[in-house]
Image (tube, rainbow, N blue to C red):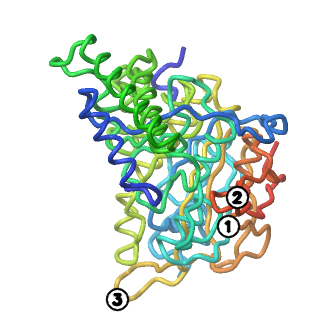
Amino acid sequence: MNRPHELARRLDEPSRRDFLSRAAAACLGVGAMPWLEHASLAARGEGRLRRGSARRVIYLFMSGGMSHLDTFDPKAPGSAVMGPTEVIDSAVDGLRLGAGFRHLARQADKLAVVRSLWSNQGAHAQGRYFMHTGYTLRGTIRHPSLGAWTSKLLGPANPTLPAHVAVGDNDVYGPSGGFFESRHYPLPVGDPEDGLRNAHLPKTVSEEQFHRRLDRVAAMDRAFEAKHGEAKIVKAYSEAYEQAVQLMRSKDLAAFDLAQEDEALRDAYGRNEFGQGVLLARRLVEHGVRFVEVNSGGWDTHNENFEALEERIPPIDRAVAALLADLEARGMLDDTLVVLTTEFGRTPEITRDRNGRNHHAKAFSSLLAGGGIKRGHVHGRTDERGDEIVDGKVRVQDFNATIAHALGIPLDFVLNSPSGRPFKVADDGQAVLELFA
């Protein structure tokens, strides 16, 4: 037993998903539950799937472009590129972090720090989309994000819970089902303190009334199919009702209830939206959710970079350190992959007029831990200014391929979009095998 102190709007089908939610509320007498279905193994290639050491992913996204220099790739203290940011040693010899990460520094022996990420997308929307999908943003198609691929190819570990959940204020360029069926879209959870809202029948609707309404909806669907033939939208309605009811009846709804956690443990993660979101992610993967993303916004530090990071870093530091200690204590770290990433870094140059840093896509940093990843490891290197990658370049596609490889998703497995175009989980990305133990 763990001791506490140890430690979218969617790009695709937005109107349809909103309508389904409202239809379920109107027809069944329940609130606007997010639209869910079971995920399943792809019909083709089922025998080719292999399971890696990671069974699930907690994906922490720093939206806005986190400065690598002030966090995971600091340079010489007092140098021009560092400004007032101080540097601290960690539990790993030679691995230094920005001084704001005093808790995480003690957990550094569980981390692999990737200091050589490279992107060709230097704008926010395009960068976030690229990081999530491995494909460039286009007007003609919407690509599935990593969580959707995980849902599609691995399916749910718990048949009564969704395989893919997104916590926090995610935008249309973040986690998405893309051209996959709507059941692979993430279940959105806004405020983690609220849990899964509207998951119970209102007092004004009895069980008998509820089932009568379900029967009427089913009859309407059958009549429509008899007249117009099988239609995807009708099937989607039926599955939405079925899955909503299944989730409502699941004993694992308790996974969404943070009140069941020890108060000291909640304090350890941090009594803020991100900290409680990360704790919720741990609860969800513990109950069989495959892929949980937690978003942290506010990293676009064009203005007053150092003042902004004084506010942004501490909740991340506390929550991620608590998560790693918590997963380790529960025996879950070896088969849970923790990812912390962002869409790009920030420039070595500090703007004189605004005391900020601008976008910098050609070199930035991310963290990996658990799931078969090496511990206490640093991959790649930037120059003395943090401007250019000088060793171990990792493209965004390669980073995504590394996550997929950890999950056992074959990188050469092809799925076709509705238009017949072939796609793979990480485009042409190749897993960075040096990152694995």
Instruction: From the image, tell me which residue sits under label 1.
Output: 117
Residue 64: mark: none
**SS for tag 1?**
strand
- Residue type indicated by callout 1: Leu
The relative height of residue 17 versus residue 237 in the rendered view (above or below) is below
**SS for tag 3?**
loop
Residue 187, quarter of the rendered image = top left
Instruction: From the image, tell me which residue sits under label 2.
Output: 399
- Residue 164 position within the rendered picture, expressed as x and y whole percent measured from the top left: 53, 40
- The C terminus: image quadrant: top right
Instruction: From the image, tell me which residue sits under label 3.
Output: 353
User: Which is in the foreground here, disc 1 or disc 3?
Assistant: 1
* C-alpha separation, residue under disc 3 versus residue under disc 2: 35 Å
- Residue type indicated by callout 3: Asp
Contact between labelled residues 3 and 1, with CB atoms less than 8 Å apart: no
Q: Disc 1 or 2, which lies upstream in sequence? A: 1
Q: Residue furthest bottom?
A: 353
* C-alpha separation, residue under disc 1 versus residue under disc 2: 8 Å
Q: Residue at x 64, y 47 (%)?
A: 149
**SS for tag 2?**
helix
Q: Residue furthest top?
A: 208
User: Which is in the foreground here, disc 1 or disc 2?
Assistant: 2
Contact between labelled residues 2 and 3, with CB atoms less than 8 Å apart: no
Q: Residue at x 63, y 80 (%)?
A: 387
Contact between labelled residues 2 and 1, with CB atoms less than 8 Å apart: yes
Q: Looking at this view, is 74 or 170 the one in front?
A: 170
The relative height of residue 421 versus residue 295 in the rendered view (above or below) is below
Q: Looking at this view, is 402 or 110 the one in front?
A: 402
Q: Residue at x 52, y 26 (%)?
A: 6
- Residue 128 position within the rendered picture, expressed as x and y whole percent measured from the top left: 52, 65
* C-alpha separation, residue under disc 1 versus residue under disc 3: 29 Å
- Residue 353 position within the rendered picture, expressed as x and y whole percent measured from the top left: 34, 89
